[in-house]
Image (tube, coloured by chain):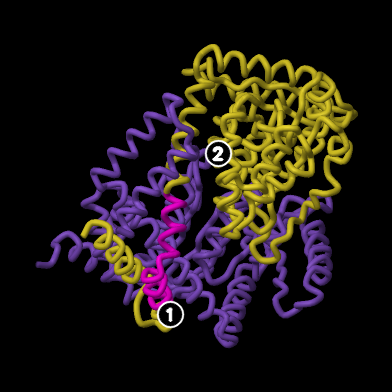
Chain colours: A yellow, B purple
Amino acid sequence: MPNQRVEEIFEGIRKNDRVLIGKGLSLIESSLDSDQEDARELLKKLIPHSGQSLRIGITGVPGSGKSTFIEAFGTALCNSGEKVAVLTIDPSSPVSKGSILGDKTRMDSLSKNKNAFIRPSPSGKMLGGISRNSRESIIILEAAGYSYVLVETVGVGQSEISVGGLVDIFLLILISGAGDELQGIKKGIMEMAQLILVNKADGKNKDAANKAKKSLENALSILYRNTPETKPAVLAVSSLEDSGMEGVRKKVEMIASELKNSGSFDENRKRQNSNWFDSEWKSQVDHFLEKIPLLKERKNQLTKDIKAGKIDPFSAADELSQEIRSRLLG
Amino acid sequence: MPNQRVEEIFEGIRKNDRVLIGKGLSLIESSLDSDQEDARELLKKLIPHSGQSLRIGITGVPGSGKSTFIEAFGTALCNSGEKVAVLTIDPSSPVSKGSILGDKTRMDSLSKNKNAFIRPSPSGKMLGGISRNSRESIIILEAAGYSYVLVETVGVGQSEISVGGLVDIFLLILISGAGDELQGIKKGIMEMAQLILVNKADGKNKDAANKAKKSLENALSILYRNTPETKPAVLAVSSLEDSGMEGVRKKVEMIASELKNSGSFDENRKRQNSNWFDSEWKSQVDHFLEKIPLLKERKNQLTKDIKAGKIDPFSAADELSQEIRSRLLG
């Protein structure tokens, strides 16, 4: 018997109905058991219709103008006939569950574009949950017909590494500074990027930005002296003056087609899929283990004992995992 | 029959033998099965001798002078008779497995102090592994007699949230800027801090740092208007001129004793232990599931099918977890 709600949302997503896309995205973020079951059913129906977009991760140090860039770049893509979805990943406050960035007021003009869809990350989720949701959100957005999915990450750190497992191309945004452009950027993030943009190349800052671009290119030549073919490209842009966006679009398309021709694009998606499988089955197993009444009881008792200082967490984990093990093997 | 290697390392750690402390730390970082067994045995022996240090998380935006601060603060602690261990957490390059920061040349003078022990995070580990190792490293360092464990995190983001699960007190380092001190700092990180330091209050920058301190205090008064008792303290310091370190030490001790008196200190450790238990048993279960030959075979086959495009990762995860479930539930 087909599930009415799932059918409705599925049809709506396929027709690019914004309200139902939103419902689908909320469904996969929900932690209710019944919602989760529906979410799984929905995703299975959508997966065959997904995969055709170019998935671009966008990161940069705080203050580098990521959202202004996404607004300008996304608009440029829409103007050239693309349909653009934006996911923002903000592993936000674990205390107040709020985001300091105030997503609602950002990307104001892009959010009104009928060819664009912006989805802020669910607040209060830890990074693991966000990556999982983002992967599933991409499926929904692709099945809804978006040809570009831009995944924005906040800050420079672990979140980029996770997002690297979700996207085809990684784009790093820098700004010119006192010659220390590279300081705040971890080598790992640099290495993930296929394209580096020096933003805010406008007004008084234009010369500085171009200088920064040059020195960055020099640094990259040294860093990539043994593998020049993987060296990221560098462009100076101004999101504010909206200049360089056409260049970014062309460059991104070029990079995508090179990756596709060399087979790296496919290879990367296959690797991502296999990692997705790996984290997904583990998360499913953890989830159902917690629901087995006997184990749940045992776990709760051990947690009490830990809090009472009767057992250390390490020995308690041993006990519980041994119990699961013997049930499984015995 | 007692395990000779474990006994030796255990005795060495208890005697504060630096070489054997290093061996213990390497043992818990090892991914070899035999090492992991020894590591578990070692940890179980050490846990009763752990827990007595003050665990301090230290974070700040790139360029805020974290390592210079730790060098100055750690030296001040050593001078007042404390034994100081430093763990750095750098979820480093997933590509080259290298760190751009060059830990070896940092904290040069502290690393030579006989009352200090500095341990950089294992390179090439993802954040999950690092947090797990860090928790266990703290056990070793406490059993070795260190009274302060400083856990340094790189960048402002997810790593802080994980480290928050390891420490008693969180310390955030900022520098004065163009009035935008708060911009790059996520609200969540701010809320985790009990003490905020405005660093580089030296030379020409002294006035700017003091102004930044004032404006930060104003902002915090508004942010914490409903819960003033949890408002973080703010101090201006200079790690370079080594000024203010005595003040930081006193403040930290005061905060710790307040937390202990109110019961929050114990509450926090209990919560951390219960979270530790929760992540530990799951990781143990994942680990042994991957070793069951039948499941391993099934998993490898599914991975192949995913790569060949025969099944999507989501359905594959479903299949595998169902198989585990039916084995477990009979």
Among all residues in the image, which is located at the extreme left?
A: B1
Residue to which mark 1 is pinned: A304
Residue B192, image quadrant: bottom right
At x 57% / y 36%, what residue is drawn? A166
The residue mark sitting in front, 2 or 1, is 2
- What subunit carries mark 2? A
The crowd level at tag 1 (other Cα within 10 Å; few <14, some 14-19, many 20+) is some
Image coordinates for residue A277, horizontal then vertical, percent = 45, 40
Whether residue A207 is visible here, answered yes or no, is no
Q: Which residues are magenta?
A: A282-304
- Quick one: quadrant of the C terminus of chain B? bottom left
Image coordinates for residue A141, horizontal then vertical, percent = 68, 35
Magenta-highlighted stretch: main secondary structure? helix
Residue A292, image quadrant: bottom left
Residue to which mark 2 is pinned: A44
Whether residue A98 is visible here, answered yes or no, is yes
Residue A111, image quadrant: top right
| Mark count | 2
Give B314 or B200, whichever is nearer the viewer: B314
Mark closest to the chain's N terminus, 2 or 1: 2
Decide whether residue B236 is among the magenta residues.
no
Q: Secondary structure at mark 1?
A: helix
- What subunit carries mark 1? A
